[in-house]
Amino acid sequence: MFVLDTRLEVRSITRVLLRRFVLLLFTEVAAIAAVLPHEVYVWQRGWTPQVRDAMTQHATNFQRIVVLAAEVTWRNKQPQGTRVTLDYATLRDCKRDIGLALRIGPSAGPFHSNDTTALTLAGLAKSLIAEAGANGVPVSELQIDFDCAESKLDGYRVWVEAMRRSVAPTPLVITALPSWLRKPAFEKLAATTDGYILQVHSLERPKSFDAPFTLCDPIAARRAVEVAGKLPIPFRVALPTYGYIVAFDAKNKFIGLAADGPSITWPPGTRTREVRADPVEMANLVAYWNTNRPANMRGAIWYRLSISQEHLNWRFRTLGVVMRGRVPQADLKVESRSSEPELQEIFLRNDGSADFQSAVSVRARIHGARVIASDALGEFGLGKPAGDSISFRASQPFLRAGEERKIGWFRTNKKAEVELEVTK
């Protein structure tokens, strides 16, 4: 007669469950370890209250904050340094690693290790780190952003060696373009650094107003990372959050571009287009690199930190979702507000994580009264009245993530019940 030992069965089940739990725990830890680390760049030369607020609200979402500290331009082939007045109190309070960026404008050299130019650049780099340290902000790295021609990479290495000696032991990294990766001189240049920032975002001069153009081609970005992964040097990838206004004259010739900042008055007849970083494409890149990236790819750095008053840059609620490798979505809500019993003001709000720009219609059904006056606001227009309803329509309204806008109003002959519907 066969007798089942329930104690053995319980122990067997327990071992199976334990193995599954350990496997699940290991998988979860591996997934957490695989998540791409994120940093952000602060490009502003003036630390306005809006910049300080952005730092206070969002800095803890990043592993490192890299701030523009100085720029070098050239006069009669001699370097002219301009320092940014940094808010060290805000940098201290953000409780994150702080990197400093030194931008150097285009130069054809000459490149020497101990001439006036090299000594000036090395001295400026050293003083930036010393000033930050004196203000209670230890610098985790110095980032050199030199607009270098590919034919001058060997010369650039001479400057990098001089600056690296001057800032030691602070790590020094450089920005690099994908086109540099296949140049024999680049590996020698990168080997003199503590790593580099691979900038896969840029805007080539558009050929015409209708020509397609993008700030970051995700396919090209993945290919560049694959090439960089074959070099024995650590790197991070710079990804865009910003946009440009691109301008063309009446003859369809490119005449310039504008970013967030002071407005530009374009000549009569100018046509403009906006080109923006695509959050869907960037989210897909992050999701891919979370599990499929080279061992020497150490993270992403976003260009740039979201500031509330910027029009062409993402809001942080968009960036925060993209950093998790998720596709942001718009979420339109509509409501009416009544400051007087017979007056209804209609507000459209985007509660989502993505900006909205598409055709939209808002219909208000009025019960128990009739409309005696109405108007639409901004790019919205009034639709044709239909029975007990009134509508507000727009073909391409732009509503940022988190933004609210009054789109119209109507007045009734007496207090009414209003039912609202939004359709896209």
Image (spheres, grey):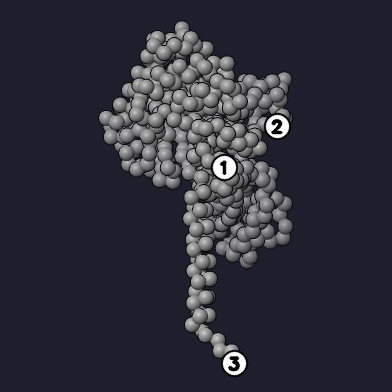
Residue at 56 percent of width and 89 percent of height: 3
- Which element type, helix, strand or loop, lies under badge 2? loop
- Which element type, helix, strand or loop, lies under badge 3? loop
Mark 2 neighbour density, 10 Å: few (under 14) some (14–19) many (20 or more): few
Q: Is residue 275 above or below residue 387?
A: above
Locate residue 343: give its quadrant.
bottom right
Toward the viewer: 27 or 132?
27
Residue at 42 percent of width and 39 percent of height: 64
Q: Is residue 221 above or below residue 180?
A: below
Residue at 67 percent of width and 55 percent of height: 423
| Residue type marked 2 | Pro
Residue 385 seen by the camera: yes
| Residue type marked 3 | Met
Q: Is residue 23 above or below residue 282?
A: below
What residue is disc 2 on? Answer: 212
Mark 3 neighbour density, 10 Å: few (under 14) some (14–19) many (20 or more): few
The tag earlier along the polypeptide, 1 or 3, is: 3
Q: Position of residue 357 (x, y in %)?
A: 63, 44
Q: Position of residue 370 (x, y in %)?
A: 65, 60
Residue 309 seen by the camera: no
The tag earlier along the polypeptide, 2 or 3, is: 3
Q: Is residue 55 above or below residue 204?
A: below
Evaluate if marks 1 and 3 touch, with contact meaning CB atoms under 8 Å apart. Answer: no
What residue is disc 3 on? Answer: 1
Mark closer to the observer (1, 3): 3
Gap in angstroms between the C-alphas marked 2 and 3: 81 Å
Toward the viewer: 76 or 165?
165
| Residue type marked 1 | Arg
Toward the viewer: 31 or 134?
31
What residue is disc 1 on? Answer: 293
Q: Position of residue 274 (x, y in %)?
A: 62, 33
- Left or right: residue 164 versus residue 374 is left
